[in-house]
Amino acid sequence: MPANDDHPSLSVIATRPAACRQGCQLDVLVQLNTPAPISAAQRQTVAMAIVIDRSGSMAGTKLKAACAAAQQLLRQLTASDRVAVFSFDNKVQTVVPLGPPSEEAIERIGAIRSGGSTALVDGWRAGMNALLDARGLERHQRRVLLLTDGQANIGPRRGGDVAPLVGQACEEGISTSCIGLGEDYDERMLSAIAEAGQGNLVHLTAPQQLEAVFTAELEGLQLTIGRHLQLRLQPGPGVELTQIYNQLHTNTEGWIDLGELQAGSTPSLAVALQVAPYSADGPAVAELLKVQARWRTADEQALMLEALLRLPVLEQPAWDALPVDEEVRQEVLLQQTARRRREAMQGIDQGDAGMSRTSVQMALDSLQTLKGSSAVQREEQLLG
């Protein structure tokens, strides 16, 4: 069900358009479809902390491209936006204190020079604190944008140690996106930070791509139409929720956090339901799943949508002959491969290279059954 011109809509799709009277498992895709991007006059104000690795490995083309991308981003901001820039090697330097964009700020970015080691978490913390401590940002979309080409060798060095700090900042309304440049950055660390910070993780092989990524981050924040998006799933009688394929968890009230809601985006959740057998005189149509979505607008208005998955009940032979919905199948496989990729990274942390290879190979094999969409190509790249 597509969104109308003004409001999001909630859809629930099962792998097959019916339930089986003899019992069955159904994969289900929940999607919140949002309106097309809003006009420039309606875009949200943003507050960004750009944190740039200036360690020795960034010297030359990488650092020059990073500075140029940051300068271009400042040129796209308005007077109502706020930006801070930090650089780090073994120490963190405040390049541009939080404030409106200016020509002086652009000049300061151009003066960043490379240094020594990599105090990655200290750099992130400086950016986060700048946004956390500032006043008057209640209506701004706040994000730390962390760029590095290496691995933390000063301070915390494991994603599990950093994720709780990033998650706490996210609860305060500050998200984090990470850009890994080259082949030597710590993907496990950046994945943990981006996931806990409900931001993006971007892998770049060429520094020339940085400007486009910085611009995409800015546009994503400007198009945010809601905060604290959550979903709640309530299975019907005789139905059990057996798995959430996304790497997401329910809180004590049964809500699942999905982060920010952006115009033109389609947040989704893939789950598995186990449907118990129905009696011969049971219902012809069964209510399998109730879904609720809630979020807060920029002016803190609480909004909620509900959707219900109701399907006809068929005998086993007729149910077996039904087609499988390819969109649901693809999303489930993508979430399964992403889970195996995270398992592989955990295996590397634990020194189990054999387990990591097995997880990656299983993920790659499962992707062979899908057509080459951009999402599939992205996952294949991450697995590689």
Image: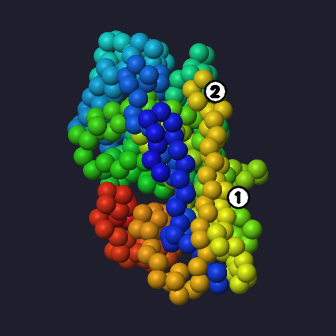
Q: Residues within 10 Å of mark 2 (few under 14, many from 20)?
A: few
Question: Quarter of the image holding residue 114?
Answer: top left
In the image, 334: left or right of 270? left
Residue 379 against residue 196 in the figure, above or below = below
Residue 383 against residue 283 in the figure, above or below = above
- In the rendered structure, find residue 103 and report the number of the disc placed on it: none
Circle 2: residue type: Glu
Residue 44 against residue 163 in the figure, above or below = above
Residue for point 61% across, 16% down: 135
The residue carrying mark 1 is 234
Residue for point 48% across, 56% down: 188
In the image, 75: left or right of 36? left
Residue 247 against residue 9 in the figure, above or below = below
Q: Residues within 10 Å of mark 1 (few under 14, many from 20)?
A: some
147 or 257, which lies in front?
257
* Residue 112 appears in the rendering: no
Residue for point 64% across, 69% down: 285
248 or 147, which lies in front?
248
Q: Position of residue 20 (x, y in %)?
A: 60, 79
Residue for point 55% across, 69% down: 27
Q: Position of residue 261 (x, y in %)?
A: 52, 39
Q: Position of residue 78 (x, y in %)?
A: 39, 16
Q: Quadrant of the C terminus?
A: bottom left
Q: Are marks 2 and 1 in contact (CB under 8 Å)?
A: no
Question: In 3D space, how far apart are the residues under numbered discs 2 and 1 (Cα atoms)?
Answer: 26 Å
Circle 1: residue type: Gln
| Badge 1 element | strand
The residue carrying mark 2 is 300
